[in-house]
Every structure is written in structure tokens, then in C-alpha cells.
Image (cartoon, rainbow, N blue to C red):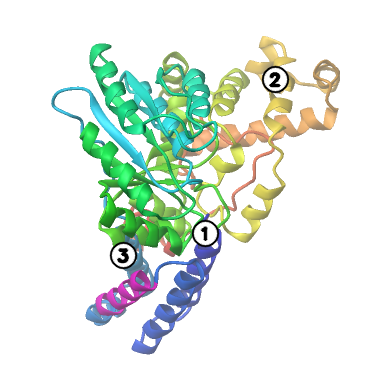
Amino acid sequence: MFESLSAKFQGAFSSLRSKGRLKPSDIDEITSEIRSALLDSDVALSVVDFFIEELKVRTNEVLADLNKSTNPANAVFEIVNSLLVEILGGSARRIRYAKKPPTVILLTGLQGAGKTSLAGKLANYLKAQGNTPLLIASDLQRPNAVTQLQVVGESIGVPVFAPEPGNGVGDPVKVAKAGLKFAEDKLHNIVIVDTAGRLGLDAQLMEQAKQIRDAVSPDEVLYVVDAMVGQDAVRTAQAFQDGVGFDAIVLTKLDGDARGGAALSITQVTGKPIMFAATGEKVTDFDLFYPDRMASRILGLGDIQTLAEQAKGAFDSDTAAKLESKFASGEDFTLDDFLAQLEAMKKMGSMTKLLGMMPGANSGAMKKQLEQFDEGELVKTQSIVQSMTPLERNDPKVLNGSRRMRIANGSGRQVSDVNSLVERFSQAQKVMKQMRTGKGGMQLPPGMAMPPGMPKQPAPKVVNKKKSRSGNPAKRAIES
């Protein structure tokens, strides 16, 4: 979503790095560039003004100290990073659970924001944490909203309370109250209430949302907003806050190609934190919103922490333990390990999206490779490895010409595909060894190396090691 903004930030800092000692005019120049970048990304004017004013104040206050440092641009970069984290909310906000179950979560927002799909994603997320959620179908206005929620609930194994068919028939307040009673009787510890939206703000929408809120006394009211709407999302959020009130925000469609101004504006304008973010169509494309990680992605540093968490979740405990043990003991990374890794990667979803979390993913060269990446490459690679014997998987050095021909025929691929796999696997082994010794420029989770067909990252520039001042990723990004 923030590709354009990220590119502009990186361009501004690239220019700043070339200046060496900074003058007040240099600060004015970069703040002007950042202001234009934020406005172009549809960030609310009030937020842009706050950001730029704070940036000027903080940089001018320490300008003399900046010029005493070995890398003044790096210090300005860190100020920008801290400001981005600040306007995005500062820290991740988690659900407040009721002292006496069930915890009631009420979803509000405009029609088209994705509330019903979001309800399923939230229920699936909470279920994975050991909870027993119940979905309540209180959107009785939108055609087929009840049916949609039932289908979503069935797909994730979460029950749906839906006594009314909807399509304009039934009382949503009565449904919400009856659903809460049902949850108490059946010992569900979480209730998620899906409510009706409208195509625009109106008195009827606000009044109905208030009545449902008063009927179920929710522990959390979450405002669901389409991140691609832009500044209008901020305006409607303010109206919902004034009319109904909400405790936190959920951003949907963060995988879209819009400018992303809503994500950078909504917390600063409403004073409410972003709690969750939905980044795709699958029920698993959903997680807590981490302001520091989002700021890192905007500034081109990637989001290795989220990538590592997703990788950890994709590996079963036995496979993960085996790979970690091999990683720690210094054993060679084999094609059997590689095959297990590919299986896990398939569970993690779109590889293009995952690789978009890597540092430099929005840079010209790597961005172009990501756009050209074939998602079917994992299946091709898997078929080649599965056509090998146990000996060949454990010792690729035995792969002579005749063996490679047999593997190509067995997998329905070309010998050139087998050769490419072996070459890329050799590179993956080297990456694992570099990570083990701490010399690798790209830190991935143990056992997770780039499979064949993945974009290659350019080798990091070597900085004067004696003058390297910090392990901070923001500093490393500027220094490199």
C-alpha cells in the first residue's frame, strides 16, 4: 500500500545522505519533500502539519549535535521513524477481556468496509488462541449478509447465531440480545456482533448502532474502516466517534494499491488506536497492528519480525525443533529440510506478499523482480525435490548429468530447471552458514532460506566496521 510513499521517503534520504554536514536549509528541503510525499499519499492535512512541525522542531533543536555525529542523515532518519510510530499509535493495542465472560466485541462501520469478512477473520484469530467465539448476525439490512456470515463461520468452524434471515427482515437489537444470552448459556467466552453498515452516514445508522451497543454493553467497540478510502475514512471515523463512540480501529484492505492516507491519519485525528489490520482475502490475512513495524515498512526497512512470526506459525513444532537443532549444531541444510520449508511456505500464503516484507522490497530492482515472480514456482520446485532419491536430497553433489535427466523427466520439468534448483539451493546453504556465523546481511528465521525463483537481494554495502555505532535497523539502513 505504501509503495509510493516509501519510494519518496527513500529518495529524500538518499539526497540527504549526500550532503554530509547539514544546514537549516537542508532541513527545510527534506521537510518540504516529506510534506509533499505525505499529501500525495492522502494523509489528512492536520496530520501532515503536525508531522512537519514536529520534524522541524526536533531536528532544529539538535542540529548542532547532528553535525557532530558521523552520519547526520541517520539521526534525521531516526526522528522521522519515531514520528511515524507516534502518529500510528505508538504501540500495539490488544483486546480487553471481560472479567466475567463472555467478552463482547461490537463491529461498526460503513457498508463496503468489509465488516462481515472481518468478523470471520477476528473469530478465526481468537479461536487460534484457544477461545470459543460466537458470531452474531445482527446485520439484517444488507442482502445476504446473514448468509455470508454463516458461510464464513462454517469455513472456520465457528458457530453463528442467526435466528433471522435478514434481507431487511427482523430486529437487529433483539438478535444481538438473544445472541448474547445464547453465548452465556453455551459458555462461549467471546461474542462478536456484526452490525449493518450504510453507503453513507445517516441518522438511522447511528441510532441502530447505539441501540445495539446499549443492548449488549460491549467490552470493545471496533470501528472497521477500508484503508483504501483515503481522507474520507478519517471524516467518517470522526463522525462515528461522535455519534456512537468506539474504542479502537480495524483497518481492512491494507493489501490494496491505494495511497494509505487513512492508516497514517486516523489515530492522530480520532485519538483511538489501530488494533488490527487485514492484509488480504484469506481468513488468516489478519493480525495485530504494530505501529513500529508499519513505520519500518514505510521507511523501506521491511518487516522481518512479522515474517519470522508467520514462518514460526507455519512450521509444525517437530520440524521447527529439528531445523533449529541443525542450525545450532552446524549441520548442513539438506534438500529434505528445503522440502519441509517449501511446505511451510505454502501455508504462509502469497510469496509475493511475504517477500514484500523484506528490506528493500520497494526499491526499483527488487520491486521489479517481485512483480515478475511466478507464484507457481514453489509447486515446480517441490515436484523436482520429490523426484529425487533420499541420497540425492542429502548429498546434491552426487547429482551428475544422468541423475538430473531422470529427475527432470520424473517431475515433468527441464534439466535447466533442475540445474537452477541445485544452484539456488547451494546459495541457500551459504545463506544459512552466514546467518549461523552472524555474517549474513539478511536475517531470516532458522531453516528459512530463499527458495529457487525468489528475488535475489543485492549484497549489502560494507560500512567501516570500527565506526559502526549501533545494531539499530534504522541506523543500519542509512549506513548501508
Q: CA distance from mark 2 to mark 1?
A: 34 Å
- In the rendered image, residue 206, in percent from the top left (x then y), is placed at 33, 49
On the image, numbered disc 1 is attached to which residue?
461
- Kind of residue at disc 3: Leu
Visible residue check, residue 212: yes
The secondary structure that most of the magenta stretch takes on is helix
Q: Quadrant of residue 429?
A: top right
Binning the other alpha carbons within 10 Å of mark 2 as few (below 14), some (14 to 19) or many (20 upward) gives many
**Of marks 2 and 3, the one in the foreground:** 3
Q: CA distance from mark 2 to mark 3?
A: 47 Å
**Of marks 2 and 1, the one in the foreground:** 2
Mark 3 vs mark 1: which is more N-terminal?
3
Residue at the left extreme, as displayed: 99
On the image, numbered disc 2 is attached to which residue?
385
Mark 2 vs mark 1: which is more N-terminal?
2
Magenta stretch encompasses residue 148 = no
On the image, numbered disc 3 is attached to which residue?
83
Q: Which residues are magenta?
A: 45-58
Marker count (numbered): 3
